[in-house]
Image (cartoon, rainbow, N blue to C red):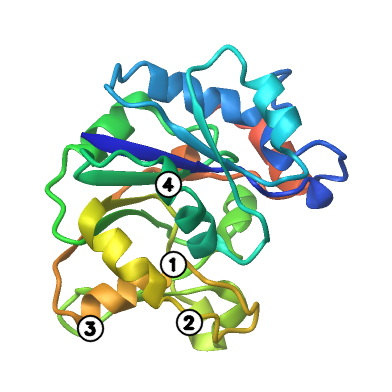
Amino acid sequence: MTDIIILAAGKGTRMNSDLPKVLTPLNNKPMIHYLLDSIKKLELKTIPIIVASPENYDQIKESLKDYDLRFAIQDRQLGTGHAVLSAKDETSLQADKTLVLYGDHPFIKTESIDKFINMEVDTLNLLSVNLDNFSDWKKVFYHWGRLIRNGEGNLEKIVEFKDASDEVKEVTEVNPAIFNFNSKWLWDNISNLDNQNKQEEYYLTDLVNLAFKQGSNINTATIEPQEAMGVNSVKDLEVAKNINFNN
């Protein structure tokens, strides 16, 4: 069984909107609805968990009233690791896997989610995006975290853009922040995250380096840039509106 956690606590500040970011309309439909529709087609025996903030919970719950969902509240904005931990009490004891998605990634296809959750999971698996450059519309990926591999090609860590050196920023394998965890490993290790970074946040991505240091096998699967794209700003929204994503 797979638990699905969808992070949706973000504000719409960068979208110049009073709406929660995940409710920003994309072609007259809230962004998170696209993702939930893709999940619904999976017909999984699980109810997704939406992580909202105290400020946006009512609006999100009302917008999603036609979906079968559970809700968790992230009481403070302390980062993605903290957001996932906020959902722990809503998860199922029977779940052996925990899939983490973001409500502002509207283009992920049902087929991709299905393939990803059926991969074997030692500690964690993640999707990655391989780019040839950051030009044209692909500049929307420039501020994403970078996947850093060792000399053997094994994933060692993810470096968030705000913590990246100029050299790391040249890496063109980026992180769409889509993870599938071994549930027991996740809940045993998430409390080991710290906030020693420029944002002073608990990064979910730091679990990659933790798993690497433990000698665990971290599997990655690639996803097309158009499908992985998230919408984090007005400029991103304009790109999303004008590209045919075939979703």
What's the distance in space between the residues labelled 1 and 3, CA to CA? 23 Å
Answer yes or no: do the residues labelled 1 and 2 have beta carbons within 8 Å? no
Q: Which residue is mark 4?
A: 89
**Residue located beneath label 2 in the image:** 168
Q: Give the x, y percent position of residue 143.
A: 61, 65
Q: Which residue is mark 3?
A: 213
Q: Which residue type does callout 1 highlight?
A: Thr
Closer to the chain start, of discs 4 and 2, is 4
Residue, disc 1? 172
3 or 4: tag closer to the N-terminus: 4
Q: Residue at x 52, y 16 (%)?
A: 67
Disc 1 to disc 3: CB gap under 8 Å: no
Closer to the observer: label 3 or label 4?
Answer: 4
Does residue 29 appear to the left or right of 145 in the view shown?
Answer: right
Q: Is residue 247 visible?
A: no
Which quadrant of the structure image shows residue 209?
bottom left
Question: Amino acid type of disc 4?
Answer: Asp
Residues under labels 4 and 1: Cα distance?
37 Å
